[in-house]
Image (spheres, helix red, strand yellow):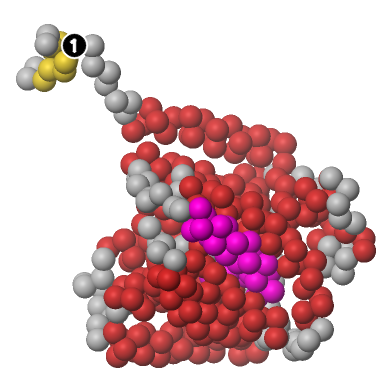
Amino acid sequence: MSTLVTSPGATVAAGATRAPSLWAQRLPIAIVVLALFGWLLWSVSSRQALLLLVGVGLGWGLAAARFGFTTGWRILVEQRDPSGVYGQIILLALLAAVSMPMLAHFPETHAALGPPSISLVVGAFVFGLCMQIADGCGSGTLYKAGLGVPLNMGILPLFALGSFLGSVHLNGWLALGATEPVGLVQSFGATGALLATLAALAVVAVGVGLWSGQRFSLRRMPRRWVWGAVVLALFAALNLLIAGQPWGVVYGFGLWAAKGATALGLFDPAQNAFWSDPGHAQRLSQTLLLDVTSITNIGILAGALWVAPRRPQDAKPLTGQQWLIGLAAGFIMGYSSRLAFGCNVGAMVSGISTGSLHGWIWVPMAFLGTLIGIRVRRRFGF
């Protein structure tokens, strides 16, 4: 076979095609993101343009670090490896240290408050169960869909449909029992709320260390969990500063499905307590590009796509039964996330970091669900 000289000391086979460079693969993504950024800046608002870039940063951090909330919990249970949970604790501590003072000093910013309720308890438990079967929470489904994981790509529209139906039924669930949301920053001030949050996170870290037999140590942790936590904390804090509200995922999904159902004449928002609320009704009538959560979700997909060329997915083929169970879990996960006022991002990360009591209720209930979800996952060979 003849060869062609391409540079001193390097040859390639004649007729062979050179694989496109990483930058060549990423160029279309960069062009699309920059074009959308420019259009948002020109036609919508500088805020939405900046939030697109925040979403890209979040998606890049999630995908490049493989910062999986679901995976972190699963490896703790199955392998007694606490590194993923320690990474999440670092994220929560860093983000709380920035978010709580911000909430106290900038009245235009708002905490991710949710009411302690039967809806929250049931929703968090079911969500924790289903996220293990579906191998991804709200953010995990989003960034893995961006990476091209087939199951998560299939789950994404069903998650959106489930989230929409959960919002439609939410008031009925709240009627079963709910109290007013509790905000630690409003109750104790930024300093008191931050000290209480950091103390609670320290207690969790000690408990995890005692159970796993591996005490918290930055030196022993895989680097991806540490720098992933720092990146996510940075961009989540920027989300709060720019948008005036914490990072969320689930609401955008439900809004997408609600707009689709309304456009098809299948749903009348005026007849529903949730979607007839003035704030939700306004978002339903506007373009998705004006919605904060939707634009960051789009950015997360783009950020994951940016990582995808160097993170090829070798997911094992699923059986028909596994596909059916996984997709059903994704739909139920969407429904339960709305009942629980968020997923690992909206309820846990944003809830705890902005001082919402409901975040601290969500975590143990979702973890109990995870213990069952891992068994179901094993039973069906995922």
**Left or right for 232, reference 328:** left
Q: Residue at x 11, y 11 (%)?
A: 1
- The vertical placement of 20 against 139, above or below, is above
Whether the magenta-drawn stretch holds residue 326 is answered as yes
Task: Left or right? Give the position of 230 relative to 3.
Answer: right
In the rendered image, the quadrant that contains the C terminus is: bottom left
Q: Residue furthest left?
A: 9
Q: Residue at x 33, y 76 (%)?
A: 78
- The x, y position of residue 131, in whole percent, is 52, 67
- Residue 45's quadrant in the figure? top right
Region of the chain picked out in magenta, as a range:
320-346
Kindly identify the residue that appears in the image at 88 percent across and 59 percent down: 269
Front in this rendered view, residue 266 or 57 = 266
Viewer-nearest residue: 83 or 183: 83
Q: Is residue 87 above or below residue 120?
A: above
Q: Position of residue 307 (x, y in %)?
A: 40, 44
SS at badge 1: loop
Q: For the residue marked with disc 1, what is the amino acid?
A: Ala
Any part of residue 175 in sight: yes
